[in-house]
Image (cartoon, rainbow, N blue to C red):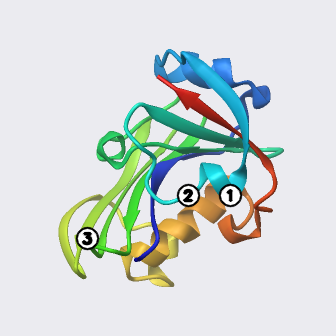
């Protein structure tokens, strides 16, 4: 089984407040509980669930993949929406900067089926979308995805 995650990386941490995330995206959470980053980033987030990790300067949200095939944009923020499936070799990313579209790519089995916007500087170093997704998460978050301690605090929310 391959690694499969989907979500949104944002270069602001919303004061580490789950309700501010809900307000920004128009979500209503019926239940919120504290979990570890390991639990939050586990393969595919089920429908009706949202997992949120706040770093000191950014936010990483894990959503059901179906909710990540459309872009999200926030004023005064860099926002990367992504779906990464190593199992099916399908990868999607959409990058917005201050509500301005910069780049969208959909790649399935190494075939680019959709792309819009100008190539990002990181694409020179990472020509495949699977690698580019993690490079973009790292850039938006200001830290590498795999450097986040699995025991760090995150939030599991139900909609």
Q: Does residue 103 show up?
A: yes
Relative height, residue 48 to residue 82 (above, below): above
The residue identified by callout 2 is: 42
Q: Residue at x 58, y 60 (%)?
A: 137
Query: How many C-alpha atoms fall within 10 Å of the one at disc 1: few (<14), some, or many (≥20)?
Result: some
Helix, strand or loop for disc 2: loop
Q: Are marks 2 and 1 in contact (CB under 8 Å)?
A: yes
Helix, strand or loop at mark 3: strand
Residue 49 percent coordinates (x, y): 48, 34
Residue 25 horizontal/vertical position (percent):
48, 23
In primary-sequence order, the first of circles 3 and 2 is 2
Whole-percent x, y for residue 14 in the image: 72, 28
Q: Is residue 98 visible?
A: no
Q: Are marks 1 and 3 in contact (CB under 8 Å)?
A: no
Quick check: 7 left or right of 112? right
Number of numbered markers: 3
- Considering only vertical position in the picture, is 147 above or below 6? below
Residue closest to the eye, 5 or 132: 5
Q: Quadrant of residue 18?
A: top right
Q: Quadrant of the N terminus?
A: bottom left
Name the side, left or right, on which 94 lies relative to 137.
left
As helix, strand or loop, the secondary structure at mark 1 comes to helix
CA separation, marks 2 and 1?
6 Å
Seen at 35% across and 49% down, the residue is 65
- The residue identified by callout 3 is 107
**Which residue is labeled 1 in the image?**
38
**Nearest the eye: 9 or 86:** 86
Figure quadrant of residue 83 = bottom left
Given this view, does label 1 or label 3 mark the residue nearer the observer? 1
């Amino acid at each position: 089984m391959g690694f499969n995650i989907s979500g949104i990386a944002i270069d602001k941490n919303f004061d580490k407040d789950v309700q501010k995330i809900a307000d920004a995206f128009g979500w209503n959470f019926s239940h919120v509980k504290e979990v570890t980053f390991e639990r939050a980033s586990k393969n595919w987030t089920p429908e009706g669930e949202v997992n949120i990790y706040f770093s000191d300067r950014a936010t990483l949200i894990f959503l059901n993949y179906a909710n990540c095939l459309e872009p999200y944009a926030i004023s005064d923020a860099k926002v990367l929406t992504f779906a990464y499936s190593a199992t099916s070799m399908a990868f999607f990313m959409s990058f917005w900067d201050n509500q301005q579209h910069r780049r969208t790519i959909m790649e399935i089995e190494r075939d680019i089926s959709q792309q819009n916007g100008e190539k990002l500087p990181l694409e020179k170093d990472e020509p495949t979308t699977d690698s580019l997704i993690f490079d973009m998460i790292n850039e938006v978050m200001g830290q590498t995805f795999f450097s986040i301690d699995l025991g760090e605090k995150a939030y599991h929310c139900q909609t």
